[in-house]
Amino acid sequence: MSGCCGAELILGGIVMAGASVQWLTGMGFALIAVPALVLLLGPAEGVALANCGAGAICALGLTGGGWRRVRFAAMVPLVAASACTVPAGTWVAARLPEPVLLAGTGTLVSLAVLLVMAGMRVPALNGVKGALTAGAAGGFMNSSAGVGGPPVSLYAVNAGWTVREFVPNAQFYGIVVNAFSAAANGVPRLNTSLWTLALAGMAAGAFIGRALATRVPERGARLLVLLLALAGGLSTLAKGAWEL
């Protein structure tokens, strides 16, 4: 019984941490939460919960006028491409053994974080073709590993978007791609206690993130998010490799 309660509290803490950094920096819920959720719940349930949580947080992030700053014309190729590749990601994830999924998830998270940290400019991610490439990669990664944001971040870097421009558009993309992913992967099969703690974690994370937003420098907060995400990705990779 105590072990079960401990796992429930850990899940609530994971969701709270992810929600906090999402509200603080405009990104990071999936990068922070996915490695830990996958280790705690398994790849399928962990990714499914991350899809639901990230989509909900992105939707809340656009309330209060955020929708007006979304570049809908620019987002069309991104979300259209993601719709085409989400089913492929789900199909691949459903057919791989759990250790392979753990290793694959850890690898994708770690590589994505390193690419975002490097701020790489990739000529293939320019223009409409770049948007289609980023959207397709994001859709596949989101449904298979729960982390669809980094390709869009790289696209934004190549497009020269400022942080103010990037955040609402990334949130809009997050709503759409996570809705597609949740439809493909299904809703996680959690008991009432786990759902309650997950929702409580999201609410507490929103409160903490908003409270810290005016006190923590954006650059430092973003670096902390990426370092924590990298640590989580490498841990998941190590566990998957150990079990292979």
Image (cartoon, rainbow, N blue to C red):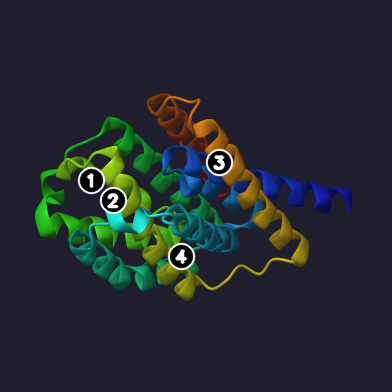
Q: Can you name the residue that lies furthest to the front here?
A: 64
The amino acid type, in three-letter code, at marker 3 is Ser
Q: Are marks 1 and 2 in contact (CB under 8 Å)?
A: yes
- Under tag 1, what secondary structure? helix
Dot in front, 2 or 3: 3
Q: Nearer the viewer, residue 89 or 102?
A: 89
Q: Quadrant of residue 140?
A: bottom left
Dot 2 alpha-carbon crowd within 10 angstroms: few under 14, some 14 to 19, many 20 or more: many
Marks 4 and 3 sit apart, C-alpha to C-alpha, by 28 Å
Q: Are marks 2 and 3 in contact (CB under 8 Å)?
A: no
- Which residue in the protein does label 3 denote? 20
Q: Earlier in the sequence, mark 4 or mark 1?
A: 4
Q: Earlier in the sequence, mark 3 or mark 1?
A: 3
Marks 3 and 1 sit apart, C-alpha to C-alpha, by 23 Å
Marks 4 and 1 sit apart, C-alpha to C-alpha, by 27 Å
Dot in front, 4 or 1: 1
* Residue sitting at x 69%, y 53%: 200
